Image (cartoon, rainbow, N blue to C red):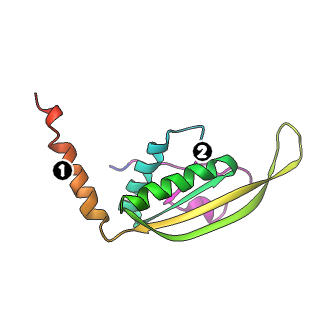
Amino acid sequence: MGVEAVAATGGGGGGVEAQKKNRIQVSNTKKPLFFYVNLAKRYIQQHNEVELSALGMAITTVVTIAEILKNNGLAIEKKVLTSTVGMKDENKGRVVLKAKIEIVLGKSEKFDLLMNASNVATETDPKDKE
C-alpha cells in the first residue's frame, strides 16, 4: 500500500503534465523541507526518477531539495529547465510573470544501498530499545 501525493496544478495547466505520477510541485508555505526530501526519495524508489517543480519564491526550496539528494549520493541530475509563466493575479486582475524551474533527478547507482543502510540504522537504533 503506497501513499500517492497528487500535486495540484496552479493556473490553466493540464494535459500531459498533470498526468505525471513522479512530479512534485513544491510550495515553500505548505510543507516542511524534509517532507519534500522524503517524498522525492519515495518517488525515486517507485519510478527511478522524480521531477521537482516550483514557481517564484519556492525555486530556492526545489534547488535545496535537489542538492540534499545529490550530496547524499541518492540522486543524479538529469535535466534542469527554467521558464517564465504568466499567472493571473487575483488581487490586481492582471497577468503576472513568474519564474518556473523543473529539475529531473534520476536514481543514483548507490541509491538502493544507501536506502537499505539507512533502514537498517533506524531499525537497530539503541534509543528504541529499553
Magenta-colored stretch includes residue 12: yes
Q: Is residue 6 above or below residue 46?
A: above
Magenta-colored stretch includes residue 31: no
Residue 109 lies left or right of residue 36; in this view the side is left
Helix, strand or loop at disc 2? loop
Residue placed at 52% from the left, 66% from the top? Answer: 104
Q: Amino acid at mark 1?
A: Val
Residue placed at 60% from the left, 62% from the top? Answer: 102
The crowd level at tag 2 (other Cα within 10 Å; few <14, some 14-19, many 20+) is some
Report which quarter residue 53 is drawn in: bottom right
Helix, strand or loop at disc 1? helix
Q: Quadrant of the C terminus?
A: top left
Q: Is there CB contact under 8 Å for labels 1 and 2?
A: no
Mark 1 and mark 2: Cα distance apart in space: 31 Å
Q: Which residues are magenta?
A: 3-27
Residue placed at 88% from the left, 39% from the top? Answer: 92
Report which quarter residue 89 is drawn in: top right
Identify the mark at residue 27; answer none if there is no mark: 2
Q: Is residue 11 above or below residue 102?
A: above
Q: State the residue position of label 1.
A: 120
Residue 129 lies left or right of residue 57; in this view the side is left
Residue placed at 55% from the left, 56% from the top? Answer: 63
Image coordinates for residue 55, horizontal then vertical, percent: 67, 52
Q: Amino acid at mark 2?
A: Ser
Image coordinates for residue 96, horizontal then vertical, percent: 83, 50
Residue 86 lies left or right of residue 126; in this view the side is right
